[in-house]
Image (tube, rainbow, N blue to C red):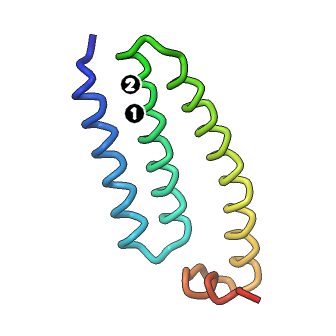
Amino acid sequence: MIPINWVVGLAAIIFAIGAIGVMARRNPLIMFMSAEMMWNSAALAFIAFARQWHSMSGQVMAFLIVGTAAAEVGIGLAIIVTVYHRRHRLDIDEISGMKG
């Protein structure tokens, strides 16, 4: 059995990599994938704590996180593809300038 400290440490490392990817990159696809890594690290932490406390609530939260991430994928990729088709390049400044 893997200790909970290792699993939570792995979740923290994955979350940190995702946060650095969101802050350091200007490509929306990379930022999008980094945000997905952050969602998955939160799900991993919920599952680890649920296993530690012998509760199903962590699995339920992980399921909700996966559902929310799937909805984010649908909407986010649609926006990214639309911007790319209209401007033929991806830049986060152009997407934030679409306020209207």
Task: Report helix, strand or loop for mark 2.
Answer: helix
Q: Residue at x 48, y 35 (%)?
A: 43
Q: Where does the image place residue 42, in percent across and percent down from the top left? A: 44, 41
Task: Report helix, strand or loop for mark 1.
Answer: helix
Residue 67 picture quarter: top right
How many numbered circles are shown? Answer: 2
Q: Is residue 73 left or right of residue 43?
A: right
Q: Which residue does the numbered mark 2 point to in the structure image? A: 49
Task: Estimate how packed mark 2 is, as few (under 14), some (14 to 19) or many (20 or more) residues with alpha carbons within 10 Å.
Answer: some
Picture layout, residue 5 above or below residue 29: above
Picture layout, residue 83 above or below residue 94: above
Going by the numbered disc 1, the residue's amino acid type is Ala
Q: Where does the image place residue 28, in percent across and percent down from the top left? A: 55, 71
For residue 45, the mark is 1
Q: Are marks 1 and 2 in contact (CB under 8 Å)?
A: yes
Quarter placement of the N terminus: top left
Q: Nearer the viewer, residue 46 or 22?
A: 46
For residue 64, the mark is none
Q: Nearer the viewer, residue 16 or 88?
A: 16
Residue 18 picture quarter: bottom left
Q: Where does the image place residue 9, in percent across and percent down from the top left? A: 25, 37
Q: Is residue 18 left or right of residue 62?
A: left
Q: CA distance from mark 1 to mark 2?
A: 6 Å
Task: Estimate how packed mark 1 is, as few (under 14), some (14 to 19) or many (20 or more) residues with alpha carbons within 10 Å.
Answer: many
Residue 21 picture quarter: bottom left
Q: Residue at x 68, y 83 (%)?
A: 88
Going by the numbered disc 2, the residue's amino acid type is Phe
Q: Residue at x 41, y 73 (%)?
A: 25
Quarter placement of the C terminus: bottom right
Q: Residue at x 48, y 15 (%)?
A: 55
Q: Is residue 41 left or right of residue 12?
A: right
